[in-house]
Image (cartoon, rainbow, N blue to C red):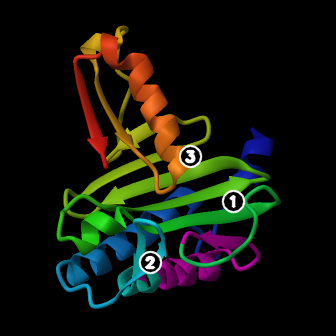
Amino acid sequence: MEKESREIPVGTSGKTAIEVARSAAIKAGQILLDKFLRVERITFKGRGNIVTEVDMEVQEEIFGILATEFPEMKLLGEESPGEQADCGYVWIVDPLDGTRNYASGIPFFSTVVGLALDGEVLVGVNYDPKRNEMFEAEKGKGAFLNQRPIEISNKKAIKDAVIGMDMSYDEQGAMNGFEVIESIWQNSSNMKGLW
């Protein structure tokens, strides 16, 4: 128990890491809602992989919250070069997961904030502000949706499940996705793809 309390730190305000991650994601969600349908600038990081000024603003806001609470920890964000996630405590942030949806006016997007120690994720939240859904987990404590426990499906056969997948931004990722689809297609009854 003593080891766990050392691994999952408390911020300068006395809030736990999960509380800080949660409040940072909620603040990010407020910005995302305020700017939704008002994206002014889109740039491309690669084929089909875009970034907007909103991604950058949200990441800066989250980094500010995390740096205030945990000034000695590293920050790794999707929208900026940063630290490696496998050395010491590192906050890992995707400020706008679903940028393509967001920039297209499709209301399916979220903010992801996680804390890793030497490459092992200790705390993670994924907040969807349009639905006010906060998925969160802390090492050894289970996973929750809006603070209610969630569980994996009890379905045992692929044919009874709905399968969703993202086909990646690059050729190799897409080819891997097609291989997965091909291997399970015959036994599946409902598959959704994000192309």
Q: Tell me if 158 is positioned left or right of 174 in this view.
A: left
Q: Is residue 168 above or below residue 150?
A: below
Q: Position of residue 105 (x, y in %)?
A: 17, 70
Q: Position of residue 16 (x, y in %)?
A: 57, 60
Instruction: Give the magenta range.
Output: 58-78
Locate residue 131: give its quadrant.
Answer: bottom left
Disc nearest the viewer among 2 and 1: 2
Q: Secondary structure at mark 2?
A: strand
Q: Which mark is residue 172?
A: 3
What is the spatial separation of the Cα atoms under label 2 and label 1, in whole angstroms? 36 Å
Q: Which mark is residue 44?
A: 2
- Give whichever of discs 1 and 3 has the lower sequence position: 1
What is the spatial separation of the Cα atoms under label 1 and label 3, in whole angstroms? 38 Å
What residue is disc 1 on?
A: 9
CB atoms at circles 3 and 2 under 8 Å apart? no
- Give whichever of discs 2 and 1 has the lower sequence position: 1
In front of the other: 150 or 112: 112
Q: Secondary structure at mark 3?
A: helix
Task: Indicate whether residue 59 is drawn in magenta.
Answer: yes
Q: Tell me if 2 is positioned left or right of 64 in this view.
A: right
Residue at the image point whose x is 77% and y is 52% from the top: 6
In front of the other: 14 or 141: 141
